[in-house]
Image: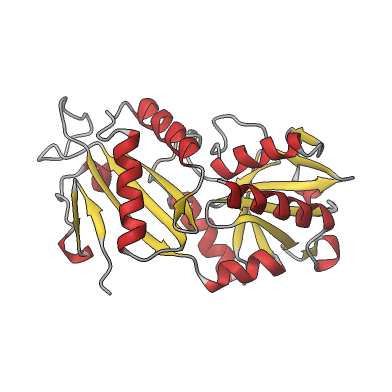
């Protein structure tokens, strides 16, 4: 079965989905994106993704080209036509094309919208069960990480370094404090309390993070949103990441330090259970 993608209102084969070489998403990374999980053929936590999409568009001053209802229909159509039971939908919105290259965009451009679906990999499922290794790296990304833009080379560099060292994800730090993973939210567990960095311009407001923090309150799990160092991280009882593709994924090693004896800890396992219960309900 051929893969079907979406671009500017059309469903087509990937090779037929083209954009102008003058599109500002290509020339300036003048674009935002969203990645939503598909579970049991359904889009998970759609409302949260739309709230973040609206905020990113507003911060970039890009007009919204589609309503939430149109986006939901498009995502569901992609999941259905690509036979994705469990996977991801990637959606990107660029400012559009000027027909030339200029740092200052002209007014009235029509945004470019494209999206595609892909299944989750077996690697993701194994990591969910066994945990992953992370490699620490300086956070060299731009200063507005709260906007989900496509300017991701800082994360690409960090992830390449991590993978070359045999790790699955990068753990980024700045000014002595942990920010987040290369493409995930990051947490440690200290005396059964979840510790994570508070929201600011320094980290992305993860939709999985948002849902998990609500679940922590509902299940009387202690939470401490504060800055914490790499040294504190290496001494933590447990560690884990969250994301649209990873859900709640244990971290069992950071650099050369084994976390929690090298096995997913009881608090992380409990959070996996309550989060998957949330996934099945929604």
Q: How is the image coloured?
A: secondary structure
Residue at the image position 86 percent from the left and 45 percent from the top: 192
Q: Nearer the viewer, residue 234 or 209?
A: 209
Determine whether, in the image, residue 217 is placed left or right of residue 109: right
Q: Quadrant of the N terminus?
A: bottom left
> Can you give x and y, in whole percent of width and height, for residue 32 in the image?
36, 40
Q: Position of residue 109 (x, y in %)?
A: 16, 31
Q: How many numbered marks appear?
A: 0
Q: Residue 123, relative to residue 111: is it above or below? A: below
Q: Position of residue 6 (x, y in %)?
A: 24, 53
Residue 154 seen in this snapshot: yes
Q: In the rendered image, is residue 29 in sight? A: no
User: Residue 79 sits in which quadrant?
Assistant: bottom left
Snapshot quadrant of residue 13: bottom left
x, y (%) of residue 131?
Answer: 70, 65
Seen in the picture, residue 81 relative to 182 is either above or below; the reply is below
Q: Residue furthest left?
A: 99
Q: Residue at x 27, y 28 (%)?
A: 63
Q: Is residue 202 above or below residue 74?
A: above
């Amino acid at each position: 079965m051929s893969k079907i993608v979406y671009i500017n209102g059309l469903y087509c084969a990937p090779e037929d989905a083209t954009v102008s070489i003058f599109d500002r998403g290509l020339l300036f990374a003048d674009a935002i994106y969203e990645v939503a999980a598909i579970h049991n053929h359904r889009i998970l936590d759609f409302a949260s993704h739309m709230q973040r999409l609206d905020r990113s568009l507003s911060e970039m001053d890009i007009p919204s080209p589609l309503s939430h209802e149109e986006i939901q229909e498009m995502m569901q159509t992609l999941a259905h036509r690509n036979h994705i039971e469990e996977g991801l939908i990637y959606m990107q919105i660029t400012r559009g094309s000027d027909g030339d290259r200029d740092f200052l965009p002209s007014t009235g451009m029509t945004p470019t919208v494209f999206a595609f679906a892909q299944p989750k990999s077996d690697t993701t499922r194994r990591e969910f069960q066994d945990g992953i290794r992370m490699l620490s790296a300086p956070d060299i990304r731009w200063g507005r990480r709260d906007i989900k833009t496509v300017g991701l080379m800082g994360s690409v560099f960090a992830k390449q370094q991590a993978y070359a060292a045999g790790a699955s994800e990068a753990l980024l730090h700045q000014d002595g404090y942990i920010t987040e993973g290369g493409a995930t939210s990051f947490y440690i567990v200290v005396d059964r309390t979840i510790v994570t960095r508070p929201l600011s311009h320094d980290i992305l407001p993860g939709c999985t993070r948002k849902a998990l923090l609500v679940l922590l309150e509902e299940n009387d799990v202690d939470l401490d949103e504060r800055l914490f160092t790499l040294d504190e991280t290496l001494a933590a009882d447990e560690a884990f990441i969250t994301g649209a593709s990873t859900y709640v994924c244990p971290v069992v090693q950071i650099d050369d330090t084994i976390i929690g004896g090298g096995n997913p800890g009881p608090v992380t396992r409990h959070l996996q259970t309550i989060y998957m219960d949330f996934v099945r309900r929604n």
